[in-house]
Amino acid sequence: MIQVVGTGPGNSDYLTPAAEKALTAADVVVGYRTYLDLIQDLLQGKTVISSSMLQEVDRCMKAFELAESGQRVVMVSGGDPGIYAMAGLIYEIAVQKDSKIPISVIPGLAAVNSCAARLGAPLMHDFATISLSDLLTPMEVIEKRLHAAASADFVIALYNPKSKKRTENIKKAQEILLLYRKGSTPVGIVSAAMRDDEVVTVTDLAGMLEVDINMQSTVIIGNSTTFSWHGQMITPRGYKDKYAL
């Protein structure tokens, strides 16, 4: 059996009971080293297989090898395993192998949820999530999606906005968004949400690049109705137009 488990933001307070149960019952826990470091107290007595970034395929292959030997394997993903994480790759490999190993996905609190909670209520209306990582997706495709989401007035959450080597994509995203939105549009930037080193900033579209943005950050750009209030972002759902508030 392989269970793909989302551990949420990494704070044990936000780990679901189902995720904790799966980790407790596992024989082997496989995952990216940084995410495993955040759940060390749940790994006692387990065989732990950790690796670095960009070794996702190797981790998944090892998970199948171990599961095929009869062990209960948990593949750990930070946030939710079905959002830019390991669930899809596990299933892609299962298809290629025509595997008979049972697979289940245990959801976790996604980064967009954790960050939105820290910012107030920015996702109260339709929104889109877009990853700025061009490692697996060509930049021209990312740009097309940015144009589409911005022109449709979605609130936009940017995953993987910037790394040490990849610094231009966030600039391009800002450039595209400014074609459709005012520079005063509220923008929330949350790094390491719900961890000890959490940083929360509310700024605007024109000034967002003045804030420290890294791979632990999620950037949420408001739509045409989003406003800021006492350091929080609020995107109205439309109640004011329909009901007397």
Image (cartoon, rainbow, N blue to C red):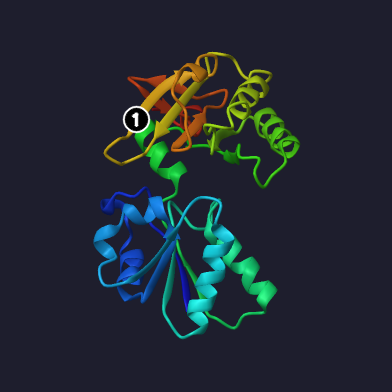
Indicate whether 17 appears above or below 135.
below
**Quarter location, residue 141:** top right
Q: Residue at x 71, y 30 (%)?
A: 147
The picture quadrant where one finds residue 28 is bottom left
Q: In the drawing, does residue 67 fall left or right of residue 152? A: left
Q: Which residue is mark 1?
A: 199
Q: Position of residue 189 (x, y in %)?
A: 44, 28
Circle 1 SS class: strand
In this rendered view, identify the residue nearer to me: 119 or 37.
Answer: 37
Question: How many numbered dots are placed on residues in this image?
Answer: 1
Instruction: From the viewer's perspective, tell me whether residue 97 is left or right of residue 158.
Output: right
What amino acid does circle 1 point to? Answer: Val
Q: Residue furthest bottom?
A: 70
Q: Residue at x 37, y 38 (%)?
A: 192
Answer above or below: position of 49 versus 111. below
Quarter that holds the C terminus: top left
Q: Which x, y percent locates residue 213?
A: 47, 28
Foreground pick, 240 / 10: 10
- Using the image as rendered, state which of residue 238 and residue 16 is in the foreground: 16
Q: Nearer the viewer, residue 208 or 168?
A: 168
| Residue 236 percent across, percent down from the top left | 47, 30
x and y percent of residue 130 in the render?
60, 39
Q: Is residue 98 left or right of residue 199?
A: right
Callout 1: 10 Å neighbours few (<14), some, many (20+)?
some
Kindly identify the residue that appears in the image at 72 percent across and 41 percent down: 138
54 on left or right of 146: left
